[in-house]
Structures are given as structure tokens and as C-alpha cells.
Amino acid sequence: MTEQEKLMCEIMGNISQTKAPIVFKGALITKLILAEHGFETIERQTTDIDSNWIGDSPPMSVLVETISQSLGNLQDSFHAVAIREYVEKKISGS
């Protein structure tokens, strides 16, 4: 696991501890699950944290603020930023 991936795991851990209604998904989670079962030589490096909001999606400003507040001691170095608005029921790539 790269240093960047370790940092992303720390960020996910901080967010999870706040009980924000977020479920993590994607390549980083898959890589963690595989590593837990002894498959540690996964070559694909991940560069982001994929997640879904559980329940009704709040306005983007609430989502960004919730994640920023969840960073804990990492708030001095990081903050959440919306790079695009989300669209309900949109499949990536369509």
C-alpha cells in the first residue's frame, strides 16, 4: 500500500468515526479487502476515495462541510472541496 493510500485510509477512518451517513466503495476498499485475505500484491494504485451518501442526498455544501468536519486532526492539512455537482441516478461514464 502506498503512502497516499495509507493517508486515504486514515481519512476514511476519521469520517467513519463521526457516523456521517457515508458508505465507501471502489478500488481502495477492494484493495483493502483483498489485502486482508492475503492478496497484497495488487498492482493497481488508487488515487481517490469513492463513496455514496446513505439516504437522501443533502445539498453539496452540507456534504462538503460534513466531510471537512470529519477530518479530525487532518483538518490542518486537508479540507473537502466539491469539484463537480453530483447528479442523482447518473451512472459514471454516461
Image (tube, rainbow, N blue to C red):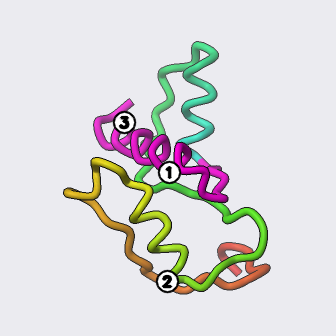
**Which residue is tagged 2?**
61
User: Of marks 3 and 1, which one's residue comes earlier in the chain?
Assistant: 3
x and y, in percent, of residue 34 in the image: 61, 25
- Look at the picture and state if 47 lies above or below 92: above
User: What residue lies at 50% left-to-right and 20% top-to-bottom?
Assistant: 40
**Which residue is tagged 1?**
15
**Quarter of the rendering containing residue 63:** bottom right
User: Of marks 2 and 1, which one's residue comes earlier in the chain?
Assistant: 1
User: What residue lies at 33% left-to-right and 34% top-to-bottom?
Assistant: 2
Whole-angstrom CA distance, mark 3 to mark 2, is 27 Å
- Look at the picture and state if 94 lies above or below 28: below
**Front residue of 80 and 85:** 80
User: What residue lies at 41% left-to-right and 53% top-to-bottom?
Assistant: 47
Q: Please state which amino acid type lies under the numbered disc 3.
A: Lys
x and y, in percent, of residue 58 in the image: 65, 80
Residue 33: in magenta span:
no
Task: Say which mark, if any, is on residue 92.
Answer: none
Mark whose residue sits in front, 3 or 1:
1
x and y, in percent, of residue 66 in the image: 49, 67
Q: Quadrant of the N terminus?
A: top left
**Front residue of 52 and 5:** 52
- Look at the picture and state if 17 lies above or below 23: above
Q: Is residue 80 left or right of residue 34?
A: left
Task: Say which mark, if any, is on residue 6.
Answer: 3
Magenta range = 1-26
